[in-house]
Amino acid sequence: MALFWVLGTICILFGSMIAGHLEKGLGVDDLSYSLALLIAFVLILLGGLLWISVAIAVRLRD
């Protein structure tokens, strides 16, 4: 259960780091920008899903 919580934290951390450093600048084409945005979005969603699963497991345990 704690492993899912830590994995969720890591996923949200990396998703936020990717999303925070995204810039549409020189040398960045539309495909790579969209792919990085999609990866960041999926990582944040996966982290949230892991946190929700831990919350449900704690609720059912007590």
Image: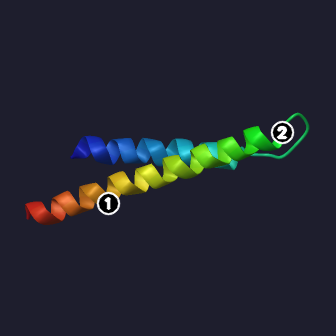
Instruction: Tell me the quarter of the picture where residue 3 sits.
Output: top left
Q: Amino acid at mark 1?
A: Ile
Label 2: element kind? loop
Determine contact: label 2, label 1, CB under 8 Å.
Answer: no
Left or right placement of residue 35 versus residue 40 in this view: right
Label 1: element kind? helix
Left or right placement of residue 6 versus residue 58 in this view: right
Residue in the picture at 58% in, 43% down: 39
Give the residue pinned by disc 1: 52
Q: CA distance from mark 2 to mark 1?
A: 35 Å
Residue 9 or residue 49, whichever sits in front: 49
Percent coordinates x, y for residue 40 in the rendering: 59, 47
Give the residue pinned by disc 2: 29
Seen in the picture, residue 3 relative to 55 is either above or below; the reply is above
Left or right placement of residue 18 versus residue 53 in this view: right
Q: Amino acid at mark 2?
A: Asp
Q: Residues within 10 Å of mark 2 (few under 14, many from 20)?
A: few
Residue in the picture at 80% in, 46% down: 23
Instruction: Tell me the quarter of the picture where residue 25 sits.
Output: top right
Percent coordinates x, y for residue 8 in the rendering: 39, 47
